[in-house]
């Protein structure tokens, strides 16, 4: 009986083309077939079995190739059935629209005064209330409301009223 290393070496020398052909017939792809051969050889020879000769080793490898390929097909079938539930059904928005919107907002923010920009960022980006913005800026609530109102008017003029949808803060004129 030949040694373990000798059987593996003879298998690779003599049967590699036949095994690659068998892998191609199973998978329909040369690369996938070659990968299948490698996986099967590793599976068979990772444990030191008593394999008497090259013909027996080739039989073991072919059986391992069949098993590995059938298992892969089963896993793929399960995945194909489960995958549609994992993928979002709605198509994503066009990234060009998002880039254009960000560019328009960037151009609009440049038109604001520093106080108006800070008020807008604190109110709408940091999501602070008007009193919290006033406290952060060290101003009165009415002053922050005026900055926000002026800033929203400027932003709407640059971006366009139809694309600009932000809640407005009511500024009440007091009668004396």
Image (cartoon, grey):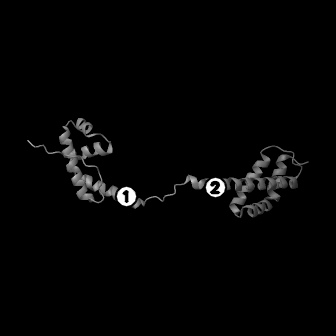
Looking at the rendered structure, which numbered label has been put on residue 67? none
Give the residue at the far left of this rendering.
Answer: 176
Q: Position of residue 16 (x, y in %)?
A: 78, 59
Question: How far apart in space, not on screen, are marks 1 and 2 (Cα)?
Answer: 36 Å
Viewer-nearest of discs 1 and 2? 2
**Residue 103 is drawn in which quadrant?**
bottom left
Q: Position of residue 165 (x, y in %)?
A: 30, 54
Label 1 sits on residue: 99
Tell which of 139 and 32 is nearer to you: 139
Residue at the image position 58 percent from the left and 56 percent from the top: 84
Of callouts 1 and 2, the N-terminal one: 2
Question: What element does badge 2 sit on?
Answer: helix
Residue at the image position 70 percent from the left and 63 percent from the top: 30
Give the residue at the far right of this rendering.
Answer: 1
The crowding category of the residue bearing disc 1, from other C-alpha atoms within 10 Å (few below 14, some 14 to 19, many at least 20), is: few
Residue at the image position 29 percent from the left and 60 percent from the top: 162
Contact? badges 1 and 2 (CB < 8 Å)? no
Q: Is residue 65 left or right of residue 56?
A: left
Tell which of 35 and 88 is nearer to you: 88
Label 2 sits on residue: 81
Q: Is residue 130 left or right of residue 25?
A: left
Q: Is residue 53 left or right of residue 19?
A: right
């Amino acid at each position: 009986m030949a040694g373990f290393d000798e059987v593996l070496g003879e298998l690779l020398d003599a049967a590699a083309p036949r095994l690659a052909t068998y892998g191609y017939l199973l998978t329909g792809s040369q690369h996938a077939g070659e990968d299948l051969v490698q996986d099967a050889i590793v599976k068979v020879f990772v444990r030191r079995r008593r394999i008497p000769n090259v013909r027996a080793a080739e039989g073991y490898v072919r059986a391992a190739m069949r098993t590995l390929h059938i298992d892969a097909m089963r896993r793929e079938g399960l995945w194909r059935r489960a995958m549609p539930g994992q993928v979002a059904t709605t198509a994503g928005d066009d990234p060009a629209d998002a880039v254009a919107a960000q560019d328009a907002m960037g151009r609009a923010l440049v038109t604001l005064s520093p106080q108006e920009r800070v008020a807008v960022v604190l109110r709408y980006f940091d999501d602070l209330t008007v009193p919290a913005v006033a406290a952060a800026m060290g101003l009165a609530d009415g002053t922050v409301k005026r900055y926000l109102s002026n800033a929203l008017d400027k932003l709407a003029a640059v971006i366009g009223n139809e694309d600009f949808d932000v809640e407005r803060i009511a500024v009440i004129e007091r009668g004396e």
